[in-house]
Image (spheres, coloured by chain):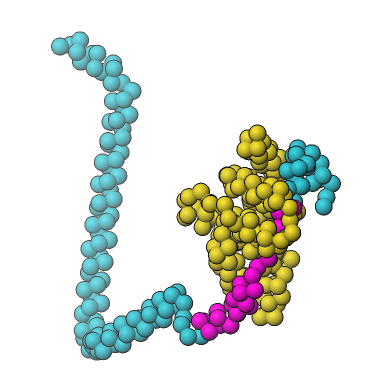
């Protein structure tokens, strides 16, 4: 079982960490959420169907991230974080593109739930509609409709800030 | 990517969508990876040395129950032995008591039935004829 757990860590750690990071915009908190999620996975590993493990983990990480966000009760300050990502992953990126990403991150974090999670799960992490529906406890049709609204809201924010 | 996504992507600025999709998926730092890999060992160690709070409560309840049982066995008086004469007397007293209860239950049942019958008849009679009876009564006065 330990071997199986290790292979699950290797397979899902980036997804879980990335989801938590995009919701919380804080590397330390994202690490905490990832740890909490994998501890829960270890505790419940026997009871979860293998095919459902990925979605289960994302659901746990998503809920844990939102819990932390609620407890924080302050608007996330993300000024430095997106630039940190860009420097780390794409050091030769053009300043203009960096600026677009920075503004996008800021705009995403100004959205409420579930709009923010929908964009993070679907547009950034490219999860299937079915998985997004499962993680957010919505129906697939709702995901599609809400995603449309989320993009519209993001677009409005984007244009308002770049007008 | 599915056709669904292409269809629903029509509602967003291409520039914005491109920007969203170009946001990097974060990679877990090596330190986190190491911590995650340690979870099975940490959990096992923790489990072996310290029982969970639920287990501790369960053990505590078991110990308390065992202690109570021992205490009761030590304190409880030994069961007394009765002679045949005492048992016969007790049986006789019990028989008298049952006869008494039987007799009074029959009497009480009869009384209750009579009372109910009278009351309900009176209530029905009074209810149906009350206006006429009342009118006649006031007319005479």
Asked if residue A38 is among those painted magenta in the image, a careful observer would answer: no
What residue appears at the point 50 percent right and 52 percent down from the top-left corner?
A70
Q: Residue furthest right?
A: B3
Q: Nearer the viewer, residue A60 or A160?
A: A160
Rendered view: B61 above or below B83: above
Q: Is residue A35 left or right of residue A121?
A: left
- Residue B40 included in the magenta stretch of the image: yes
Question: Could you say where residue A116 lies in the image, as x and y percent from the top left?
Answer: 62, 48
**Chain B display color:** cyan
Residue B7 in percent (x, y) is at 81, 41
Position of the C terminus of chain A by quadrant: top right
Pick out the residue farthest to the left: B141
Q: Position of residue B124 (x, y in %)?
A: 33, 29
In the rendered image, is residue A3 in sight? Answer: yes
Q: Residue at x 68, y 77 (%)?
A: A6
Q: Residue at x 37, y 83 (%)?
A: B63
Q: Quadrant of the N terminus of chain A?
A: bottom right
Compared across the picture, whether B1 is left or right of A130 comes to right
Q: Colour of chain A?
A: yellow
Residue at the spot 17% in from the left edge and 11% down from the top edge = B140
Q: Can residue A44 be seen in the rendering of this structure? A: no
Report the predominant secondary structure element of the magenta stretch: helix
Instruction: Identify which residue, B31 or B112, lies in the foreground.
Output: B31
Task: Tell me if residue B12 comes above or below residue A129 in the rendering.
Answer: above
Magenta highlight range: B22-47
Residue A40, quarter of picture: bottom right
């Amino acid at each position: 079982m330990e071997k199986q757990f290790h292979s699950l860590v290797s397979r899902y750690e980036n997804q879980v960490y990335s989801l938590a990071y995009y919701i919380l915009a804080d590397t330390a908190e994202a690490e905490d959420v990832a740890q909490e999620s994998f501890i829960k996975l270890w505790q419940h590993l026997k009871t979860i169907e293998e095919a459902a493990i990925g979605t289960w983990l994302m659901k746990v990480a998503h809920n844990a991230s939102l819990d932390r966000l609620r407890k924080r009760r302050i608007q996330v300050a993300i000024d430095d974080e997106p630039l940190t990502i860009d420097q780390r992953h794409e050091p030769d990126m053009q300043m203009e593109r960096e600026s677009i990403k920075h503004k996008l991150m800021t705009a995403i974090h100004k959205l409420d739930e579930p709009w923010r999670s929908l964009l993070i799960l679907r547009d950034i992490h490219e999860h299937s509609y079915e998985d997004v529906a499962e993680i957010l406890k919505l129906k697939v049709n709702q995901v599609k409709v809400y995603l449309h609204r989320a993009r519209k809201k993001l677009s409005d924010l984007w244009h308002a800030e770049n007008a | 990517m599915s056709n669904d996504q292409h269809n629903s992507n029509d509602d967003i600025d291409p520039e914005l969508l491109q920007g969203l999709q170009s946001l990097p998926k974060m990679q877990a730092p090596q330190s986190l990876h190491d911590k995650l890999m340690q979870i099975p060992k940490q959990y096992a160690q923790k489990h072996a040395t310290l029982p969970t709070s639920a287990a501790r409560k369960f053990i505590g309840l078991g110990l308390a129950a065992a202690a109570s049982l021992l205490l009761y066995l030590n304190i409880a008086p030994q069961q007394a032995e009765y002679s045949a004469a005492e048992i016969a007397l007790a049986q006789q007293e019990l028989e008298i008591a049952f006869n008494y209860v039987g007799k009074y239950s029959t009497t009480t049942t009869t009384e209750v039935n009579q009372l109910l019958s009278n009351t309900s008849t009176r209530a029905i009679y009074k209810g149906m004829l009350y206006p006429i009876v009342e009118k006649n009564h006031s007319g005479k006065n």
